[in-house]
Every structure is written in structure tokens, then in C-alpha cells.
Amino acid sequence: MKKAVIIPDSFKGTLSSLEICNILSENIKKHFPQCLTISIPVADGGEGTVDSFLAALGGDKIYETVSSPYFEDMKSFYGVIGELAVIEMSACAGLPLVEDRKNPSLTTTYGVGQLILAAAERGCKKIIVGLGGSATNDGGCGAAAAAGIKFYDREGNEFIPVGKTLKDIEKIDFSQRKEILDHVEIITMCDIDNPMYGPAGASYIFAPQKGADEQMVEELDRGLKHLCEVIKKETGKDLKDVPGTGAAGAMGAGMIAFFDSTLQMGIEIVLDTVNFNEIIEDADMIFTGEGKIDSQSLRGKVVVGVAGRAKRKNIPVTVIAGGATGDIEEVYNRGVTSIFTINRLPEDFQISKYKSKENLEATIDNILRLIKACDITYNH
């Protein structure tokens, strides 16, 4: 094996994608000292997205003072790689930031808009915004307000909407939206297809984990439905049935309506940004993985995204996962060569998660021993 590309997703709750890259790379060097290894840690738009892009492409982490989920000043950051900026909304609107104050009817995405504006004013011509892990349910109105968009209630009073006041929006004025944003391409990483509102929407599916009770969920959902109607009235954009608009407290909808953004699968954005098709030229093996391989792996997940591109170049793909369940035959059909799970004993996750590092090391060691044996066999 002369060239290997390592491009895993994180194993949620156990190992980051960067940690997995390091473990695999070290073991490959041990068994194949002359092998060129290229590591591309992947994130899904949530926490760790900026670090993953910087690890893969270089660049700088820029720090800014912006609004927290509760309109308090906080230190946040974004990544800059040339004229590209990478923002993760969890860095200033994330659930861990509110600690024991979970309340999606009061939290804001204002800080996300401040980061977008800061990146644009810094001269970035393309901005990737990762959705995920948010504490919010404001439909992106806070971010829009930070970008200069004005919201008015029925009495003509200007205000910054949060989840519980979305129902009060009477008019949206785009005339003072910061002009610099007109010259920036904004792409949104979004790996879910939930609609903006309704039984499968942002409030019903995600607000409970952000602290909403049943009554609040209903209130938030009505607010998002109202926002959707006002957006249609003001812009002509009908977001009612657009997949992904319910992501991150309907931030997906806000990115389309207020920032003229497109929603794209995170893995496709990553693969395009790192020039994956060129990187894998002449590769002997691609190692990828995620915490769990199942039927959901077929939609927008790292493994299938990687395998699809590898298949076109006839490059074998080895998947290392925390676990595998259900019918995964279609995963093989998409271009995966083999799947290995790291858990060696039938243990509960609460126990096995503490062994993830040693189990991963043992698994990749065995895989590489097999590859080495096959190399010797077939080269003689």
C-alpha cells in the first residue's frame, strides 16, 4: 500500500474525526512506513466543523465578541482559509452554551449573523455555515437582525424576534440588509430534511431536547408557521415544504430567506472544498467510518458520500464503525468494499465507549495485517 486517504466522521460521544485520523495514520505508518497518508477529518456542521476544515486545509481561527444565545457578550470564532470562511452556529448559539438555562422560546441566533457579517467584512467571498447543535428556535431571525434586516410588530415597533415572539412579526424590511452580503456566496451545511414546521418540523422534533415542554412546542410551531407565511408574503419564497428548513430551530429556513443561501449535504461540501476527487487519484485504499452504519447511512452520511466518489475511480473503501445494524447491503452497492466494527465484546455502549480508542487501534491493526498479508501473497 503506497497511498491511503483517511476521511472519517466522528464517533459521536467517543472519538472526534481528528482523533480517528491520527489513530489510523499512526497505525498505517507502523505497518507501511513508506505509505503516503492524507487525513481529512470530517464534521457535520455542528461542533468541531471549523477545526475539521482547518485541520484539512490549514488557515486561521479568528475570534470575535458576539451575542450568546441569551444576548450576552461572548467570545466566539470562525475559520478563514484564503477567501473562504467556515462558521459553526454552535459556536455562539449552541446548546452547551446555555447549560441549565435551556429555553428555545427565548434564545437567539443573533451571534451567528454577527459572525457571518464579520467574515464578509474581513473580505471572505464564500462562507460555509454549519448547522447543528443549536439551542435556538427563532427561524434565523436573530441572525437576520444582525445582518440589518428589520422586523416590525402590528403596532409598527421594531424588535428582534425569538421563538415565543415569532407570532408577533407583521412586517420584514430587507432594505437595510448589509450590502456587503450581496457579494458573498453563502452555503449552508445541512444533513437533515425536516420541514420548517408541522409534526416533523423543527419544533416538534428538536425543541424538546432544547428544553421545551409540550405547550411550548406547540407555541413554537405556530410561530414558525406564521414566520413562513410572512416570508412568503414579503419575498415570494414559499418554504413550507422545502427539505432542511427545519434544521437547527428552522435556521435552515432563515439561511434561505434572509441570506439567499443554499442548503447542501455537509459531506458533499467537504468533498468539494478539499478537492477530494483529485486527492484520491492513485490511492490504494480509502479508510472512512462513522459511529453507526445503518439504513440512515444511505442519506447524506460521510460513508456513502465518500464511497460514491471512490466507486467512480475503482478505489476500494474500508469502513470502520462503532457498530452496524439492519440491512446494509445497499451500503456495499454504493461503493463500500468492507465494513469492520470496533466493538469486540457484547457490551453496553456506556461501558464500551470508554474502550473506543483501544478497540479502534486493535481493529485497524488487524485490517492492516490482513492488507499486508494480501500484498505479500499477490505480489509473489
Image (cartoon, rainbow, N blue to C red):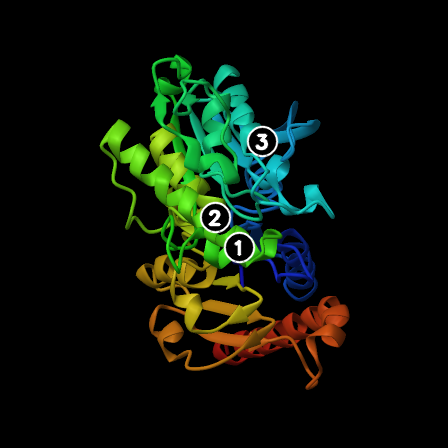
Q: Mark 3 or mark 2, which has the lower sequence index?
A: 3
Q: Nearer the viewer, mark 3 or mark 2?
A: 2
**Where residue 216 sits: x, y (%)?**
54, 51
Tag 3: residue type? Gly
Cα distance, mark 3 to mark 1?
A: 39 Å
Q: Residues within 10 Å of mark 2 (few under 14, many from 20)?
A: some
Given the current orientation, which residue lies at the most extreme left position? Answer: 236
State the residue at coordinates (55%, 28%): 110
Q: Residues within 10 Å of mark 1 (few under 14, many from 20)?
A: few
State the residue at coordinates (40%, 52%): 281
Element carrying mark 3: strand
Q: Is residue 262 visible?
A: no
Element carrying mark 1: helix
In the visual, does 160 lie left or right of 261? right
Cα distance, mark 3 to mark 2?
A: 36 Å
Provide the residue designation for mark 2.
Answer: 219
Residue toward you, 198 or 278: 198
- The disc at residue 258 is none
Provide the residue designation for mark 1.
Answer: 215
Tag 2: residue type? Glu
- The disc at residue 79 is 3
State the residue at coordinates (44%, 67%): 297
Position of 215 relative to 362 (above/below): above
**Where residue 60 sits: x, y (%)?**
62, 28
Residue toward you, 362 or 370: 362
Quarter holding the N terminus?
Answer: bottom right
Q: Residues within 10 Å of mark 3 (few under 14, many from 20)?
A: many
**Where residue 325 sits: x, y (%)?**
50, 80
Cα distance, mark 2 to mark 1?
A: 6 Å
Q: Are marks 2 and 1 in contact (CB under 8 Å)?
A: yes
